[in-house]
Amino acid sequence: MSGMKVSGATISVGDAHAKIARRGELIGADVEAGKLEFGDADLALLNEKAGRGISRGLAAQAIMGGLATLLSWAVAGWPAGVSALVGGSAYFVPNALFAFKLLLGSSTVRSPSPRPFFVGEALKLTASVSSLGLAVYLGHAWLLWPFFLFGLLCVLHGYVLQLAVRRLR
């Protein structure tokens, strides 16, 4: 398989990708001898859709983290709200930085490679675990564990909000 050239892209693909293109899911893609031809407009459309999906995912996580913080604060006061905020932020901030990097990377002209994605994902997870450890170390005197974990779990499950909104449409 050869790499992808972003402007006037040619991608060597297997039969599965050719079947996807034949079903018309890739607008303007021509299938000839196992290759997909993408124009600049097709790539811009794919990048736009990916960007919208990433942005919606981040928005859902932010909303869920905010709801967890407000609910915790309403139930048990400011220490619970802060604990939920710290727990949610420990995952949300590294995830938002990684998403921002992905959004910036989708607009550059490069050959796609899974390596930067996996390195970025590993760095995001390392930053998340480090943030959790730092929060525990610095906030051991006032951190309320149930609310800390509640905030973290709400942000981790931001996709539930996306699924609920999609079903309401």
Image (spheres, rainbow, N blue to C red):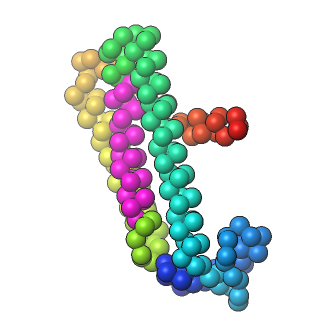
Name the residue rendered at 57%, 58% in the picture: 49
**Position of residue 9 in the picture relative to residue 99 (left or right):** right
Q: Residue 51: x and y, percent?
A: 50, 56
**Position of residue 22 in the picture relative to residue 159 (left or right):** right
Name the residue rendered at 77%, 70% in the picture: 23
Q: Residue 50: x and y, percent?
A: 54, 58
Name the residue rendered at 45%, 77% in the picture: 111
Q: Residue furthest left?
A: 138
Give whichever of 148, 137 is nearer the camera: 148
Query: Is 145 colored magenta in this rendering?
Result: no
Give whichever of 125, 106 is nearer the camera: 106
Q: Using the rendered view, name the quadrant where residue 62 is placed.
A: top left
Residue 100 in sight: yes
Start-end of magenta stretch: 84-105
Q: Residue furthest right?
A: 23
**Position of residue 155 in the picture relative to residue 86 (left or right):** right
Q: Residue 29: x and y, percent?
A: 67, 77
Q: Is residue 26 above or below residue 37?
A: above
Q: Residue 93: x and y, percent?
A: 35, 42
Tell me the quadrant of the picture where the C terminus can be found: top right
Q: Is residue 114 above or below residue 131?
A: below
Tell me the quadrant of the picture where the N terminus can be found: bottom right
Give whichever of 129, 154 is nearer the camera: 154
Q: Is residue 165 above or below residue 25?
A: above
